[in-house]
Amino acid sequence: MSSTLEKILPKLKLVEVKQLAVLCGVKSSGTKPEVINRLSAVASARSAAAATTRDSPLVLSVDLGIRNLSYCLMSPASPPRPPKLLSSAAALCDPRPVHVHKWRLQRLVQEVSPDNPEPFSPESLAVVTNRLLQEELLPLKPTHMLIERQRWRSGGAPTILQWTVHVNTLEAMLHASLRTMKELGHLSEEVRSVSPANVARFWLPVSLTMLPQLAVMPDEKSVPEQNPGGALNESQARKARQKVKGKANSKKQKMSLLESWLQRASGKEVVLPTDPDAKDTVQQFIQQFRQLRIGRKFRDPEKPSTAQKKLEKLDDLTDSLLQGVTWLKWEEHQASLLTEEGITMLQETKLLDEQNRRPSVTGVNIYPV
């Protein structure tokens, strides 16, 4: 990072520094010097890295799940915008159009069977991980692989949920396998771990009650299992219900946001599918989302296709595509805003000020601190 930029960042107010961190996909918690150090590290890493793959990345975004794993292969349909074209709230929050080459949802682990009595054992998950990489992900030849960061805390509960342990094991095996391949010279892709909280913080408002109510199907990651240590007390049960409700509302908003992108008018598209299967997924998503919006599960007895069954988990499909689009937006902001020109533009337009820090798109404020 230039010495001039090092002098500009400390002059910003704490709320402005945190807003800049949110815009660039950088952790925004902590003291002002801590956030500035993170922004400085990102700017320095960008200046030192080669720009070839950043100019034309092929991004594979993976939403992890044991039962439902979704991935989306995409590439930007337009070049990054310079600071002068990001000088409004609408421009800052407008996603970059992307070509979607693959967009799939699949079940990784099957139920217990005589052939596989322990599907979640380390040995079984190692086989699943290897098959996923060798048969599904690596043949796509992405330049960047984004893997959703899994939660690893108990969230205040007396025990860690069983599904959390399973998906954490899968996540660790994926990263270990990819790192080993990279150390041996068999992998050139950049592998990034992306926090879903940072993705949600970029798009969603503080209030989660602004969009229409949807009938969201239960998610195995949010349904508590029996606590072997005893039942939850009243306070713990209330907190658990509030957490599940908040997570469900967040999912509703993310699906609504994606649906609005998928239905943009010609010439203003965000998602441009290039593959017939991806086009079919887009249409199925829109159709099933409409059913969820009016509170009915999607059923079509005349067309019980495999594609319809795979779309039972709209939230997982949403997460994989939204994660990739958000990362590309972060890259655009890092290239344009973490510069002397970019910081100066933000100061002149006051886009980081308290009263302007939450620009609105279609009535939804999307940049909380």
Image (cartoon, grey):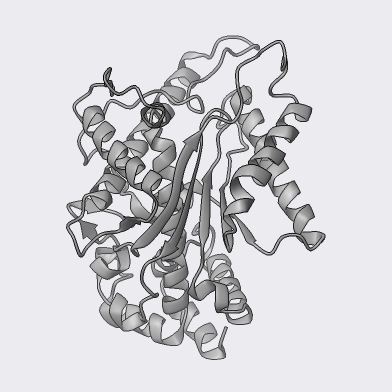
- The answer to whether residue 124 of the structure is visible from this angle is yes
Q: Is the residue 311 above or below the residue 117 in the image? A: below
Camera-side residue of 243 and 119 = 119
Q: Is the residue 314 above or below the residue 176 in the image? A: above
- The answer to whether residue 18 of the structure is visible from this angle is no
Q: Residue furthest right?
A: 184
Q: Is the residue 4 above or below the residue 360 in the image? A: below
**Residue 89 % position (x, y):** 25, 68
Residue sitting at x 33%, y 62%: 95
**Quadrant where the C terminus is found in the figure:** bottom left
Residue sitting at x 51%, y 14%: 233
Residue sitting at x 23%, y 28%: 291
Camera-side residue of 56 and 95 = 56
Camera-side residue of 221 and 3 = 221
**Residue 106 % position (x, y):** 51, 33
**Residue 209 % position (x, y):** 24, 38
Count numbered badges in the picture: 0
Camera-side residue of 177 and 217 = 177
Image quadrant assignment for residue 185 = bottom right
Residue sitting at x 65%, y 12%: 229
Question: From the viewer's perspective, is 89 left or right of 2?
Answer: left
**Quadrant where the N terminus is found in the figure:** bottom right
Image quadrant assignment for residue 166 = top right
**Residue 262 % position (x, y):** 27, 50
